[in-house]
């Protein structure tokens, strides 16, 4: 891959997704986009860059190829513990029975289904208006998420109670399928964190985990300030294990391990002597 092709590719990726591709990622870009070259029967990256310029439809495949979609059920389990131990009891006290949670870079859906499994038993649809919005830029991962079909191994570590309640046999012997009752709680939609967001909020909880690492400071700051606008005054924001809002935003206060609240809500908690 010539340097000028890599530069074209990274500028396009940055413009369309906010994803920053430093020089050290050139090998990864090469191997991920080689598949597109083969599919389009192109013999070099220069031709592929030309195709991207001439054919707007290739852009979606380009972005899908470049995203990193690693995820798993109950990844970073401490967030789900916090949800169950601290937020569920708080939310159960509410008069207003509306709950909104957003998994904002949901990949293949494991994060959203883990949220649904944590909340479903506490907030039955007959009594609660619980909705989980799950969005991602990559259209391929969203198709998989909507299907809700996973390899059995992906759920090997889930407690038997959850498996019995929410997991059914899948179409193939080594596959399993998540129950309709869980699926009904989740709306999967394509959304670019870099673009305009149509949602009104307010959200009680936003998961934005393991995606900020791909963005530069300016993009992170813009996204975090938009989260602040959409988050309820007493809402929470969960970010990934290697991410921080330190030097990114002063709108949020760290109240637990990669768990944030809007600044003033966190101060009110302190005054009331409520720990994380
Ligand atoms: C590593 S996965 C994280 C999945 C999940 N949140 C977790 O922590 O397990 C990162 C996801 O961010 C998505 N992504 C990257 N850039 C994005 C953007 N600009 N807008 C929305 N999603 C984006 C990718 O498609 C990918 O599915």
Image (cartoon, rainbow, N blue to C red):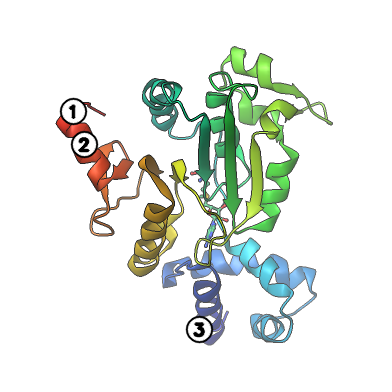
- The secondary structure type at the circle numbered 2 is helix
Cα distance between the residues tagged 2 and 1: 6 Å
Ligand 1 under 8 Å from disc 1 Cβ: no
Q: Quadrant of residue 183?
A: top right
Q: Position of residue 135 (x, y in %)?
A: 59, 51
- Is the C-beta separation of discs 2 and 1 under 8 Å? yes
Q: Residue furthest front?
A: 95
Residue occupied by mark 3 = 3
Q: Are marks 3 and 2 in contact (CB under 8 Å)?
A: no
Residue 255: where, in percent of width, then height?
Answer: 26, 37
Q: Going from the N terminus, do you reach mark 3 or mark 1 first?
A: 3
Q: Residue at x 46, y 69 (%)?
A: 21
In the image, taking residue 92 as reference, residue 191 lies left or right, namely right
Identify the residue under disc 2: 268
Q: Say whether residue 2 is left or right of residue 168.
A: left
* Image mark count: 3
| Disc 1 secondary structure class | helix
Whether disc 3's CB lies below 8 Å from ligand 1 is answered: no
Quadrant in which the N terminus is drawn: bottom right
Measure how far apart labels 3 and 2 are at the Cα level.
53 Å
- The spot of residue 131 in percent (x, y) is 59, 37
Question: What residue sits right under mark 1 in the picture?
Answer: 272
């Amino acid at each position: 891959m010539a340097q000028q092709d890599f530069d074209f590719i990274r500028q396009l990726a940055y413009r369309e997704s906010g994803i920053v591709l430093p020089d050290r990622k050139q090998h990864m870009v090469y191997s991920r986009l080689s598949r597109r070259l083969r599919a389009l029967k192109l013999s070099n990256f220069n031709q592929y860059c030309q195709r991207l310029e001439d054919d707007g439809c290739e852009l979606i495949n380009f972005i899908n190829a470049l995203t990193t979609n690693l995820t798993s059920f109950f990844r970073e389990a401490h967030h789900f513990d916090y949800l169950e131990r601290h937020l569920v009891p708080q939310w159960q006290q509410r008069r207003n029975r509306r709950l909104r949670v957003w998994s904002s870079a949901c990949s293949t859906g494991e994060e959203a289904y883990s949220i649904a499994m944590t909340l479903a038993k506490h907030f039955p649809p007959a009594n609660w208006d619980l909705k989980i919005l799950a969005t991602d830029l990559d259209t391929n991962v969203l198709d998989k998420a909507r299907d809700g079909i996973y390899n059995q191994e992906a759920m090997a570590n889930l407690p038997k109670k959850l498996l019995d309640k929410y997991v059914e046999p899948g179409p193939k012997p080594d596959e399993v399928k998540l129950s309709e009752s869980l699926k009904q709680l989740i709306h999967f939609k394509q959304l670019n964190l870099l673009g305009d967001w149509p949602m009104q909020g307010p959200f009680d909880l936003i998961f934005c985990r393991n995606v900020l690492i791909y963005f530069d400071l300016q993009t992170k700051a813009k996204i975090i300030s938009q989260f602040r606008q959409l988050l309820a005054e007493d809402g929470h924001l969960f970010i990934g294990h290697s991410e921080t809002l330190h030097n990114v935003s002063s709108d949020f206060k760290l109240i637990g391990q990669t768990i944030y609240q809007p600044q003033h809500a966190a101060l009110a908690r302190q005054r009331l002597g409520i720990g994380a």
